[in-house]
Amino acid sequence: FCNDLRDGVKGNVFQNDLGGFVQGKGFEESVKFGIVGAVKHPEILYNQVVYSGGPWAQEPSQSVAYVEAHDNLTIWDKLLATTDLSAQEERIEMMKLAHAIILTSQGIPFIHAGQEFARTKGGDPNSYQSSDQVNQLDWERKGEFLELYEYTKALIELRKQRPAFRLASGKEVREKLRFLKLPHPNTLGYALCSHAGGDSYETILVFFNSNSHRVAVQISSGPWEVLVNHKHVGEGSAIVEGPQIWLEKRSALVLGRR
């Protein structure tokens, strides 16, 4: 389990009031560490990764990409502890961004039961001996957070369809995945190149923006198919040409070029 990615995305699990990348607090190198599946990669600054001083996986399948499990706060409860209580829309955006990071990372993605509809344990960080009222799945939340549920479901389907997100070896990750230099803090971008993993897309671009405002980045000429944006997941939703594109606030953008 890649704890560097977990805490890089949402903040330290033992300090409830500290945020991570999705709250706009940085931690880009820790997120990058998880994106490559904890394998060695020349474009990661290991001295800036929160826990691991170097790679510990030989192959990406040895790393589990996650932000929430049975221990500690759920990610929804973590976001409640690190954002204004009135910021419901912003928390949903952060959840969608976190799920996009997990489900496009190399390695094995892990979604905790109920995470797809913002599971809460009422702020209980250690619920192994708590009551069913705390630990039960509240299925009414699926309706309340249907947008998040559908977005996460579509991300899972996209991952199944795109072998570029499921590279088999550390060597392939190093050869096919290249991080992009972006001019803004709290942003990340990378390219999956040369039909990575046998993907039908020659290049896939993945961007994450955790700022509270949209930012512009430059890409090579298209056409690029929009596979993921802040509202939609799936092929055929839109086409962008470049060279300038916009990353919406607290969102992911995934583009594919054949």
Image (tube, grey):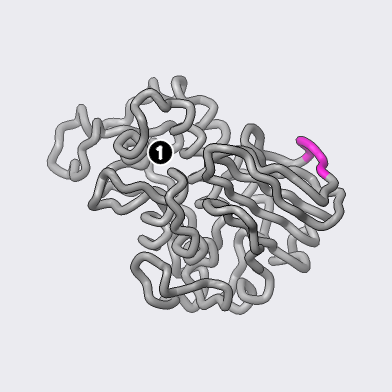
Query: What residue is rendered at 49% in x and 59% in y?
Result: 28
Query: What residue is rendered at 54% in x and 40% in y?
Result: 250
**142 is higher (above) or lower (below) than 93:** above
**187 is higher (above) or lower (below) than 136:** below
* Frontmost residue, 258 versus 218: 218
Span colored in magenta: 236-240
* Frontmost residue, 116 versus 252: 252
Q: Is residue 11 left or right of residue 245?
A: left
Q: Secondary structure at mark 1?
A: helix
Q: Is residue 138 left or right of residue 60?
A: left
Q: Is residue 153 visible?
A: no
Residue 235 rendering spot, x and y as whole percentages? 75, 41
Residue 77 rendering spot, x and y as whole percentages? 31, 36
In the rendered image, which quarter is residue 253 located in? top right
What main secondary structure does the magenta stretch of the protein show? Answer: loop
* Frontmost residue, 237 versus 169: 237
* Quadrant for the C terminus in the image: bottom right
